[in-house]
Amino acid sequence: MNDAQNYTNTNSSNSSVLIPGIYLPFQSLGSKILLLSGPSGVGKTMYCRQFLLEGLLKGDKCIFISTDLSKMQFNALFSNVEDKNILDRMEFINPCDDKSLLYNDERAATGKRISNAILSALKRSIEIASTNEMQTVSSNHRREGEGVGRTERPMRLVIDSMTHTLLLIGEKTLIEFVMDLTHILKGSNVTAILTLTSSSVDQRMVSNLSSIVDGIIEMRLKEDSNDMAIRSIRVRHLKGVYYDPKWTTFKISSKGTIIFRKAQHSSLRTPYEITCALCGKPIIGTPLVKSDLIFDSKECMEIYYRLENAYGSKISDTGLPSEAFHASFFFIDIVGLSDPTLSVKNQVHKIQILNELIHSCDSFRKTSAGKKIILPSGDGMAIGFLSSSETPLELSIQLHHKIRAYNEQEYNPDSLGVRIGLGSGPVFTVSDLNNVQNIWGPGIIIARRVMDAGDNGHILVAEKLAEELISLKDEYRKIINLISNKYRIKHGQEIKLYSAYSSDFGNPQIPAKVFYNEQ
């Protein structure tokens, strides 16, 4: 199996879990418990934060256990996460919030109570997550007329810091706790990281726990000639898996992101940068490798090779930005404009009328030039809005009103029909070989795919933008309707598709392509 194959299918519920910076895929077919050891200040907590964020982005249930952090400190740790909704799948447990555990004269009894409290809370969380997953699977299968099978939804667990827990419960109880933990996780689909601060005392704990856990990851902190701190990480021990015990250097950004430098050695013998070849962002989680290039998502990989086909093999030297930017897109074309019975003069007239009507809409006129991107597309155009996710829908509704008024004019033999697709997401500014700048990326591509599904009068909305608008205002909830759970677009990708309509705009009929797609 080649490297690209090793890193595909990352969205599968039973895909491999990649520990950031280690590049060893842990197959999600049973529990894995890893001990992360390193000096104070090396970044163990931030490393675990990134491990959990990767899981949240993939839809995993995540649990963060700490006897040290307060709820306020935990919230601060994840305060700069852009999509707050994903944090709903994160559970924080601090058994010491029950103050009675800390004020007991018998330390041994207190330690056992704390360890039991952690294990009980963990068991309860796993059982609830498993029950919810089974209910979801059962509901989905009932709708599809199928039986119910066993779920394999992965979970991620962090216990940070074991050093603080050691002080509370003692060495003997801690070892018993880890043994009990392995028993609880046995047969479940949980990947766990336990952190331990390295010291002369804790090194003995690392040795004792090495026979219990599945692997040990080491972090170290050194100073260079300029007195700058250098952080690095490696696998020291891993049961039943080949690994290359080389140190990989990393740094922590101002936003708390772990950024890895070029991996000089990896278990897969693949010399790649730890940033996406297209968007340049640090890769959190499982990378995709193809033709010696590394990407953070399948979308970026596909876009890169489309750009390479369009602009040549040296696109990395022709102005790819280091960062993507987010935009909400309005994509429109004129229905039937390519009809060979239409004269060129008539075609040009329709394009001119469409341009005039769009420019007369308040939502277009009131958006400053610096907050919108206009891209002609032959028989229509794409407009990207940087200021508001509502603007594309507002423009669609206003334009439909104006088109209706235009088509109802008494002396107007040529009616105007359009279809509209709305979407949002990251895009990139790309300079072609003639130094002409274009926009390309998931945001504009999905808007185009959505538009292509429509017929005359449709305002179709991609899932991400539709759900954002629905959650924003009740009026959007009334006019944006789900019309397909699995509409297949180009390259076999399946998406949810929504349609915006009411009595005076949009088209309430199911588009023909969607109807036949679902048959």
Image: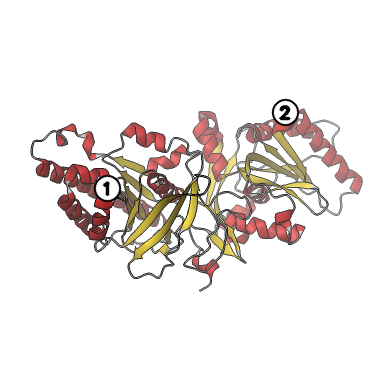
The image quadrant of residue 360 is: top right
Disc 2 target residue: 368
Mark 2: secondary structure: loop
Within 10 Å of disc 2 (Cα), the crowding (few <14, some 14-19, many 20+) is few
Q: Nearer the viewer, residue 157 or 506?
A: 157
**What kind of residue is marked 2?**
Ser
Quick check: 430 above or below 400? below
Q: Nearer the viewer, residue 213 or 360?
A: 213
**What kind of residue is marked 1?**
Met
Which quarter of the rendering shows the C terminus?
bottom right
Q: Which mark is residue 162?
A: 1
The image quadrant of residue 291 is: bottom right
Q: Residue furthest front?
A: 225
Q: Nearer the viewer, residue 130 or 309?
A: 309
Mark 1: secondary structure: helix
Q: Which mark is residue 316?
A: none
